[in-house]
Image (spheres, grey):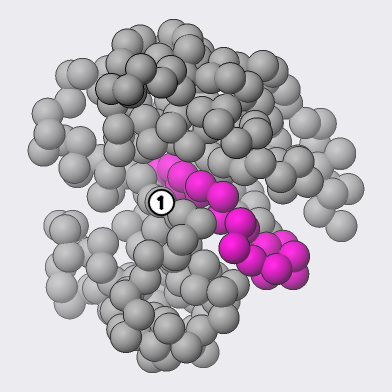
Amino acid sequence: MDLIDVKNITKVYPDGTSALRGVSFSIKSGEFVSIMGPSGSGKSTLLHILGFLDHPSSGIYRFDGKSIDDYSPKEIAHIRNKKMGFVFQVFNLLPRTSVLENVKLPLLYSNKKESEWDSLAKNAIESVGLSHRVEHESSKLSGGERQRVAIARALVNNPQVIFADEPTGNLDSKSGETIIEILQNLNKKDNHTIILVTHEVDTAKRAERIIKLRDGKVESDLYIKRDRRDKADK
């Protein structure tokens, strides 16, 4: 069964701007998909809809076999917290708070026992290679380290899918490479579904599939051959 299935999704804003114009595709659990396109193509709008952060104007969006229209507000909040993780270009960390406390934040709204929070957060921090920064204030970290904290925070509830919206946009090339490698490892080793929004061609090619948008429509939907991606990894 597809984890994500969208059919003829449109999004029209109150000012009449049409951001999405009949977008259709499906994504299976465990895929690593890049959604790319130029500025204004609708890729961030699409990610917000897929992540239950916005609602389409028309069309059908099914997540885990169920239409978004059939989820109650409580169920939507639960899915966003438990089954989805979000990483944005702007890190959205609490500045005068430790790495550990930042990563623990999603657990405040979970059903996990409070006695488990530190352990869960430290495991997520370890997975992004920042165990040596656990007690550091987030504002004193480099940009690349802060993005890794954001990924750890997205991971702490062990979500089915991680949405990453231009996660390398504010980083230098070396830090950006580290972030992409972490996302690849989460996909390959832990089987997290990764949906990466980017305008960078080289970044998009690190996924196994590229959905390209232009003017709110799907221009192409291509799978990248495994050997080609492996060469890009080296």
Taking the view exactly as shown, the residue that stands out farthest to the front is 15
Q: Please name the residue shown 51% across and 47% down the image.
A: 165
Vertical arrangement, residue 52 with respect to residue 23, above or below: below
Give the magenta-colored segment's residue range: 160-178
11 within the magenta span? no
Is 100 left or right of 229, judged from the image as shown? left
Where residue 83 appears, as percent x and y from the top left, is: 32, 44
Depth check, front residue: 39 or 146: 39
> Is residue 65 visible to us here?
no
Depth check, front residue: 186 or 106: 106
How many numbered badges does the structure rendering display?
1
Q: Please name the residue shown 62% across and 58% down the image.
A: 168
Vertical arrangement, residue 56 with respect to residue 123, above or below: above
Q: Please name the residue shown 32% across and 22% down the image.
A: 15
Instruction: Kindly identify the amino acid type of the residue bearing the numbered disc 1.
Output: Phe
> Is residue 216 visible to us here?
yes
Quadrant the C terminus occupies: bottom right
Depth check, front residue: 122 or 109: 109
Where residue 38 appears, as percent x and y from the top left, is: 65, 34
Disc 1 crowd rating (10 Å Cα; few below 14, some 14-19, many 20+) is: many
Q: Please name the residue shown 58% across and 19% down the image.
A: 215
Where residue 119 appears, as percent x and y from the top left, is: 32, 77
| Mark 1: secondary structure | strand
Quadrant the N terminus occupies: top left
**Which residue in the structure is indicated by mark 1?**
86
Is 199 left or right of 74, judged from the image as shown? right
Where residue 133 appears, as percent x and y from the top left, is: 48, 87
